[in-house]
């Protein structure tokens, strides 16, 4: 990876030189920000105090005392008054429309118990007509302060919810997004009975009488989600577009509030991509989107040759990668492990896609020069993906392919060096470490946790870069949580989760700026404050490079610019 990085930065240097040559001091800029602590977030983490912008791009980065030639009568001049300017942050893994949708349904993340969730759903049912679906997200059985009264393997039974809300079908998505909970009315809509069998890559949890518990893991969740979709699907394409437009706007507002100007959307259908392209062409995307297409082999064979999009809507939409999921999540015991779970010895997790399909998709991506991004959380899943990458890439393993493993949370020691050696990018979300740490040792045991859980330091030392993010709406989109987790691995109770795997402060900032740009082939456009790049940046009241670690969580975005235009932040 390091050798490849030299080539990338050489290209960026040529671009910067062309801008410096064509934008002489005799041509004033549109915008000047001076008196700032400018963290350029390039490889050397250079510091300066001023930035000038023209036509949506950076034309000068340097010292405030050398700005005279860049200021004209129409130049907007902003005095930063010593505040910090950094590139617009890039969340390298979230679900953009899913975030917008989650902001419109019940938020279960803070519920201390199953009883509290039942009460929350009951309140919603009181104001909705019978038969209306009730949807929520964020429950996690391992994080309840008070365990459920009726439970199987820690999961609540549907009886309490079904009795409280008998006339409304209810679908509650697990915090991880890899399981759902349904009441009796929802299971009836989905046609789920005692004799309903598990689908490939999924599991219907059942009680000791063989009756559905209400919990549907991985691919089994589709039984419930499809039933709800049948009942709630928009009537026509225009209504579908309106729904997506609202989700996009809500998600964009949430991102901009925290200084995020670009996101990597971790999986959308071709149909959604087509709608996003329409919104981008109309100038209705609030942040820049790098979208991973999530489809099966047949659809990919049909559309990959002509589906690539680059910079639609003045750089607001790019589509050149494919997303696949090979396993589930650790929280609901869906991550695919080499050895059984320490707290569920009858299970090693779930493989959610046939390996042959993954290998076929890898060969398709190589054939059509698409990036491949694979969700893999368990150590078995990560090993299978690395093997598939080697097979799919063949003699192109040493090329600048930038194929990614999304999450890469739990690795076998033997596989850690393969990331750097193969040039595979582990796209990881630091907030998952501190959020999951309370149950990781229970799932994996102490040895596996110490050797391979969220091993950022080991992966970076292998030569890999780690683009950061939040996986919103699985976690809050707030980047401060992931930045703080990256440099401290500190839990809410003050304990640290294997702190020897922390990132440095410089690495943490790069993980939200330049590294995600590299992970999306966009380092010549965004990710650092350098001449020639798009003028996407935010002014913070705190210097994230040298403040006390705990101050990261209290840092605030004061102002934000996207393509050189200031965006008004909504409170």
Image (cartoon, grey):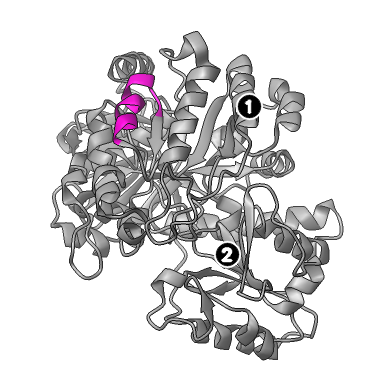
Horizontal and vertical percent position of residue 83: 21, 53
Q: Which residues are magenta?
A: 413-424
Residue underneath mark 1: 361
Quarter-of-image position of residue 295? top right
Q: Is residue 466 visible?
A: yes
Give 307 or 407, whichever is nearer the viewer: 407
Quarter-of-image position of residue 160? bottom right
Quarter-of-image position of residue 440? bottom left
Identity of the residue drawn at 25% across and 54% down: 446
Identity of the residue drawn at 52% across and 36% down: 374
Residue 220 position (above or below residue 292): below
Element type where label 2 sits in the image? helix
Left or right side of 351 for 538: left
Graded by Cα atoms within 10 Å as few (under 14), some (14 to 19) or many (20 or more), the crowding at tag 2 reads: many
Q: Is residue 479 visible?
A: no
Of labels 1 and 2, earlier in sequence is 2
Residue 223 position (above or below residue 359): below
Left or right side of 115 for 121: right
Element type where label 1 sits in the image? helix
| Magenta stretch: dominant secondary structure | helix
Residue 363 position (above or below residue 273): above
Horizontal and vertical percent position of residue 57: 42, 31
Is 22 included in the stretch rendered in magenta?
Answer: no
Residue 102 - label = 2
As drawn, which residue projects farthest toward the top? 395
Give 246 or 487, whichever is nearer the viewer: 487
């Amino acid at each position: 990876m390091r050798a490849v990085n030299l080539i990338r930065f050489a290209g960026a240097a040529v671009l910067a030189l062309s801008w410096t040559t064509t934008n002489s001091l005799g041509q004033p800029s549109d915008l000047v920000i001076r008196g700032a602590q400018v963290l350029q977030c390039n490889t050397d983490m250079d510091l300066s105090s001023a930035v000038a912008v023209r036509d949506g791009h950076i034309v000068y980065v340097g010292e405030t005392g050398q700005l005279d030639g860049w200021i004209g009568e129409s130049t907007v001049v902003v005095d930063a008054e010593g505040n910090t300017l950094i590139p617009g942050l890039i969340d390298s893994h979230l679900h953009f429309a899913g975030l917008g949708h989650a902001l419109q349904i019940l938020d279960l993340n803070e519920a201390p118990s199953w009883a509290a969730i039942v009460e929350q759903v009951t309140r919603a049912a009181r104001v909705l007509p019978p038969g209306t679906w009730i949807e929520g997200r964020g429950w996690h059985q391992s994080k309840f302060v008070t365990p459920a009264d009726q439970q199987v393997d820690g999961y609540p039974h549907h009886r309490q919810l079904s009795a409280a809300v008998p006339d409304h079908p209810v679908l509650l998505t697990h915090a991880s997004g890899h399981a759902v909970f349904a009441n009796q009315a929802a299971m009836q809509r989905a046609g789920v009975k005692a004799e309903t069998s598990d689908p490939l890559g999924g599991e219907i949890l059942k009680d000791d009488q063989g009756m559905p518990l209400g919990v549907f893991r991985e691919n089994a969740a589709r039984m419930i989600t499809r039933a709800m979709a049948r009942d709630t699907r928009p009537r026509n394409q225009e209504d579908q577009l309106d729904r997506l437009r609202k989700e996009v706007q809500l998600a964009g507002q949430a991102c901009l509030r925290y200084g995020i100007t670009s996101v990597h959307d971790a999986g959308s259908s071709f149909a959604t991509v087509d709608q996003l392209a329409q919104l981008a062409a109309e100038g209705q995307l609030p942040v820049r989107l790098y979208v991973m297409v999530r489809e099966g082999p047949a659809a990919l064979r049909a559309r990959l040759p002509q589906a690539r999009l680059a910079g639609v809507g003045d750089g607001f939409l790019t589509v050149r990668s494919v997303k696949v999921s090979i396993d589930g999540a650790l929280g609901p015991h869906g991550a695919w492990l080499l050895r059984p779970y320490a707290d569920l010895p009858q299970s090693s997790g779930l493989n959610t896609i046939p390996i042959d399909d993954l290998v076929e998709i890898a060969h398709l991506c190589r054939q059509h020069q698409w990036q491949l991004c694979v969700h893999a959380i368990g150590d078995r899943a990560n090993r299978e993906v690395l093997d598939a990458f080697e097979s799919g890439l063949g003699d192109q393993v040493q090329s600048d392919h930038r194929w990614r493993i999304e999450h890469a949370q739990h690795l076998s020691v033997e596989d850690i060096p393969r990331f750097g050696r193969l040039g595979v990018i582990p796209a990881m979300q630091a907030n998952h470490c501190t959020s999951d740490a309370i149950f990781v040792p229970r799932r994996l045991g102490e040895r596996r946790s110490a050797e391979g859980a969220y091993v950022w330091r080991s992966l970076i030392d292998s030569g890999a870069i780690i683009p950061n993010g939040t996986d919103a709406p699985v976690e809050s989109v707030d980047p401060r949580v992931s930045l703080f987790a990256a440099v401290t691995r500190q839990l809410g109770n003050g304990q640290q989760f294997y702190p020897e795997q922390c990132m440095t402060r410089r690495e943490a900032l790069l993980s939200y700026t330049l590294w995600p740009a590299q992970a999306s082939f966009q380092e010549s456009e965004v990710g650092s404050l350098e001449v020639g790049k798009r003028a996407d940046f935010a002014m913070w009241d705190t210097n994230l490079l040298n403040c006390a670690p705990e101050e990261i969580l209290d840092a605030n975005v004061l102002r934000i610019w996207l393509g050189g235009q200031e965006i008004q932040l909504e409170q």
